[in-house]
Amino acid sequence: MMMQLRLLAAALMILLAACQAKNNAGVGAVKDSAASSAATSAPEDSTPLQVPTFTTPRQINSAEVYVHRGTGLKFPSVAAGYSRTTLFTLDADEMDVSANYPVRRSAGLMAFSVYIYPITGSRPGISGREARDPATCRTHLDQVVNDALSIFDNPTIVAEESAPSPVDSTQSGHHVVLRAEGHPMLSQQGMEGPLRSEIYLFCNIKTLWILKYRITYPEKMEARAVIDDLIAAVPAR
């Protein structure tokens, strides 16, 4: 359920990014950074973790910094000089949140998306001990990569490596790079193939949470510096 909703939200974000790349987000209030103790406290190893109640993806209206209530991590309205154009939640309590910071260059459009969500979306009965197990992160990474491979034209995995976490975590993260001939929806929005799509996945953020980046751009684009700058800026500390 979680992965299907997230793919739907990603599709909405990409479409809006193509239309709104030069606009800021809509008017709204800064969200409260206070989290419920059930979401943020370190649970006992054998206690099942909190599970989000999923809903239809909806846009969050916020013109300022949005503070994720489960972790305190922040989605700024502007990061590394690029405006946040969309902000979505997949659940009623805004535990599962994603933001989009599109980048327009002469070589085309880069879709840069950041996600913070609980591991319990795909593992409802998981305990704290299981959530901290690196094997759990590896299993989730494989699911994320397989979902990505399913939506591109002729995709291949061209690189995989560990990555240092941009936020506090006891685990190293994962970085996977895909190459594809194209993407049906993106081609309609002017992002012509061949494409590169990068996945960064970081687990065990305060036990419960996962931080993920999805970045897709034309292969001809010089993207490394922009990606590094955005990852350093989002989430803001």
Image: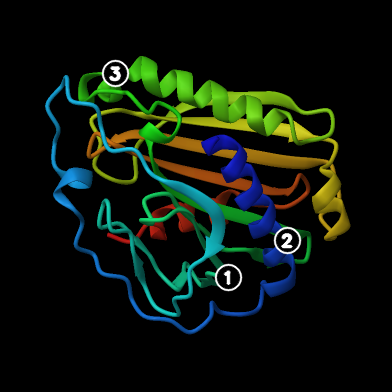
Residue, disc 1: 85
Amino acid under label 2? Answer: Leu
Nearest the eye: 175 or 3:
3
Placement of 4 over or under 185, stated as above or below: above
Q: Are marks 2 and 3 in contact (CB under 8 Å)?
A: no
Mark 3 or mark 1: name the one nearer the start of the chain: 1
Left or right, 93 with reference to 219:
left
Residue extending farthest top: 135
Residue at image x 87%, y 56%? 188
Q: Residue at x 47, y 67 (%)?
A: 80
Furthest-bottom residue in view? Answer: 27
| Quarter of the image where the N terminus is located | top right
Name the kind of residue labelled 1 in the image.
Thr
Q: Earlier in the sequence, mark 2 or mark 3?
A: 2
Residue 131 falls left or right of residue 47: right
For image coordinates 62% across by 80% down, the residue present is 23
Helix, strand or loop for disc 2: helix
Specify few, some or many for label 1: CA neighbours under 10 Å numbering under 14, 14-19, or 20 or more: many
- Indicate the position of residue 229 as horizontal and vertical percent values: 47, 57
Residue 102, horizontal then vertical, whole percent: 62, 63
Residue 30 screen position, x and y as percent: 33, 76
- Secondary structure at badge 1 equals loop
Which quadrant of the structure image shows residue 123?
top left
- Marks 2 and 3, Cα distance to the nearest angstrom? 36 Å
Name the residue tied to disc 3. Answer: 133
Q: CA distance from mark 3 to mark 1?
A: 35 Å
Q: Quadrant of the C terminus?
A: bottom left
